[in-house]
Amino acid sequence: GWGSNQITVQQHNSDTSIAIVDVGKVSGLGNVKTIPQSGWINGHTQNGQLHASVPCKVGHGYVVRVKNDISGIVHYVRLYVVDTIKQNGAVVGVNAKIQYPFEP
């Protein structure tokens, strides 16, 4: 999701944990190549849903981790923020490239 210049991932399943990490400036989705070992922002409960947010930056890559806490199965998503979408001069969203599953 997009809000307050943040990238936010949400999860409704209570048996799942989520986290997101900014891997820094990269030249495209294909340059998000590995799963980072540190820098993860773990999800927290807000209004009964699990949320994890990081500042959204054009030209940066991100990795999202979704883990089923019962089975231990982990899935990854990678994304790259291409540019912003503006209306009347205000940023209202972003154009992003996303790949799921991400299996480096």
Image (tube, rainbow, N blue to C red):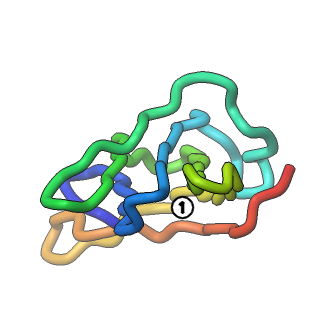
Q: Residue at image x 59%, y 49%?
A: 65
Judge left or right: residue 22 versus residue 34: left
Q: Which of 51 and 96 is in front in this view?
A: 51
Residue 100 sits in quarter: bottom right
Quarter of the figure with the N terminus: bottom left
Residue at (30, 50) in percent of width and height: 6
Where residue 60 appears, as percent x and y from the top left, is 55, 44
Label 1's element? strand
Q: Would residue 29 be found to the left or right of residue 49 on screen?
A: right
Query: Given the image, on which type of amino acid does mark 1 rest?
Result: Val
Neighbours of disc 1 within 10 Å: few (<14), some (14-19), many (20+): some
Q: Can residue 58 be seen in this view?
A: yes
Q: Going 86% across and 49% down the picture, which residue do you hit?
A: 104
- Number of marks present in the image shown: 1
Residue 64 seen from this side: no
* Residue ID at (38%, 60%): 14
Residue 94 in percent (x, y) is at: 39, 67
Residue that extends furthest to the top in the rendered view of this protein: 38
Is 85 situated above or below 4? below
Tell me the quarter of the picture where residue 70 sits. Answer: bottom right
The residue wearing badge 1 is 82
Q: Where is residue 32 in the image (x, y as percent from the top left)?
A: 73, 46
Q: Is residue 86 left or right of residue 98?
A: left
**Residue 21 x, y percent position in the rendering:** 52, 38
